[in-house]
Amino acid sequence: GAGVSQTPSNKVTEKGKYVELRCDPISGHTALYWYRQSLGQGPEFLIYFQGTGAADDSGLPNDRFFAVRPEGSVSTLKIQRTERGDSAVYLCASSHRDWIDTQYFGPGTRLTVL
Amino acid sequence: AQTVTQSQPEMSVQEAETVTLSCTYDTSESDYYLFWYKQPPSRQMILVIRQEAYKQQNATENRFSVNFQKAAKSFSLKISDSQLGDAAMYFCALSEYGNKLVFGAGTILRVKS
């Protein structure tokens, strides 16, 4: 595709439920990143994939958060037992190879936990 | 630890005028990259300009230019001939070896007609 796409655009769920957020990176980009952006703040790093493997997951806040990228393309961010504090915009970005390449962002998924 | 500070929560500029957004950062690395991203209400984070730390020449992209002061760890963005479409949240970001981008808190830019 022309750019990074994310689905759904908006997700409303109830406290305690499980959610999955999907990211489709730019074709050919091997690096993929997830960020979380709370209202009025800058994005915060969650996890970075190089190919199929998570090269850096130091930003995941706790073990309720998990992400996969099984075929080195599409990635899914999974949140178990959602809490109201998980409400935020979840941004995905991809870059051609690694850290020297510019990251291109998707439009984000706005997650609201009621 | 790498940090990015944007000290201006909000700025205003008259259409066709020039505005400068400030950013300071801290890093222990000598090789890194700096970015300015624009985020309109649509949420799409758009790259405005990128600066490699090893390059002394300031980056420019049409009406956008930076003033990169490596010793002072300062990276300001100048927008010339401001347009209504420039109104957005602007984020300064730092990337050093390790891939994660570290963002500042952002500056809201309002453009008055």
Image (cartoon, coloured by chain):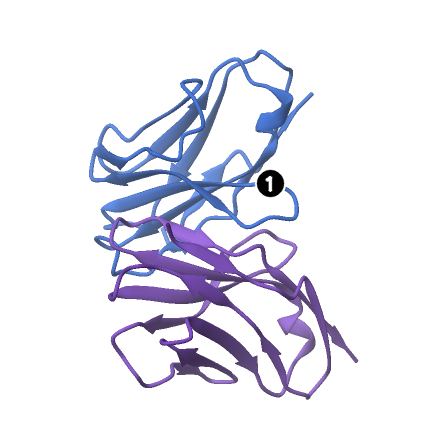
Chain colours: A blue, B purple
Q: Please name whichever residue, B70 or B91, is drawn nearer the observer in this view of the structure.
A: B70
* B65 over A17 or under it: above or below: below
Q: Please name whichever residue, B23 or B59, is drawn nearer the observer in this view of the structure.
A: B23
* A64 over B58 or under it: above or below: above
Percent across and percent down for residue B85 are: 65, 72
Decide if residue B39 is on the left or right side of residue A35: right
Is residue A110 visible to the viewer in this orientation of the structure?
Answer: no
Q: What residue is rendered at 65% in x and 66% in y?
A: B8
Q: Secondary structure at mark 1?
A: loop
Q: Amino acid at mark 1?
A: Ser
* A58 over A41 or under it: above or below: above
Badge 1: chain ID: A
Percent across and percent down for residue B77 are: 52, 76
Q: Please name whichever residue, B91 or B46, is drawn nearer the observer in this view of the structure.
A: B91
Q: Quadrant of residue B13?
A: bottom right
Residue located beneath label 1 in the image: A38
On-image quarter of the C terminus of chain A: top right
Percent across and percent down for residue A78 are: 43, 23
